[in-house]
Amino acid sequence: MPHLLSKSKYIRGLQCDRALWLDVFNPRLARYTAEQMRRFDHGREFEYAFKETFPNGIDISAELHRNVDAYPARTAELLEKEDNVDLFEAGFLYDDVLVLADVVHKNPDGSLDIYEVKSGSTLSETYKRDAALQHYVIAHCREVNKFCVVYNGMSDLSDKSDYFKVVDLTEELAAQHDEIARNIAAMKDILQHGEPATPTGQHCLEPYACPYQHYCAQGIRQMSLF
């Protein structure tokens, strides 16, 4: 079943409704700086390092690649037939939102431990909002035992002693379900209409530099091929 929203689109929508619309209907307009790409690469490097602590993990992305809408079915299949399994990039779909969890561990009772990996050195509110959406989706699909955010306080990948900071946010995230449901409903409504005429402002820079700034600043209006 195709998804409408993803974690990245949801976070984009919290920042700007116009950026959300562009992300769904005209993502080719996005432009990322060299610094942003460097941060993406660093994040992936840190994530891979944490996944190495689960040596028997099954990487769903290595099997299905960009066919992300197939991830939830494959995830469900593996969780049903495997005991105490560790999954990487496990997919869950609920309320038209698809999330891919960095690391999922299935416990003997069938419940899940989720680890969302972030490369930053502090547990930011943006990280928490990101994790809250994932908890909302996954908890409506399977029983969640705990949901942890993993972040880093070191800069040298060669020394992994005390490198991964793991914080259990399960109760805090569960308390945000009603708010997340309202946010998703609002974003779906935005996507039912034409491109919003949201003006540029400080929200173009916080919490992340928007990749559509150049487009909005130029006042360009382009019809989506979709």
Image: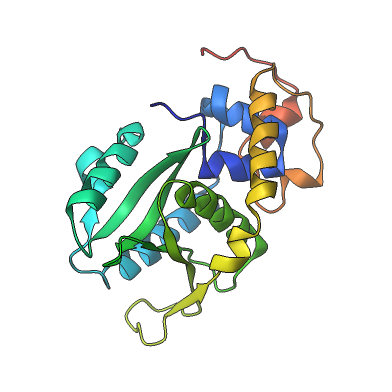
Kindly indicate the quadrant of the structure image that contains residue 53: bottom left
Q: Is residue 183 left or right of residue 26?
A: right
Q: Residue furthest bottom?
A: 161
The image shows a total of numbered marks equal to: 0
Give me the residue at 73% from left, 43% from top.
204
Q: Is residue 49 left or right of residue 225?
A: left
Is residue 113 placed above or below 77 in the rendered structure? below
Residue 104 visible in the shown view: yes
Q: Is residue 26 left or right of residue 61?
A: right
Give me the residue at 51% from left, 32% from top.
96
Quadrant location, the N terminus: top left
Q: Is residue 226 left or right of residue 18?
A: left
Nearest the camera: 133 or 50?
133
Q: Provide residue 38's location: percent of width, then percent of height.
A: 47, 56
Is residue 89 placed above or below 171 in the rendered structure? above
Is residue 3 placed above or below 49 in the rendered structure? above
Residue 32 visible in the shown view: no
Q: Provide residue 11's location: percent of width, then percent of height.
A: 61, 46
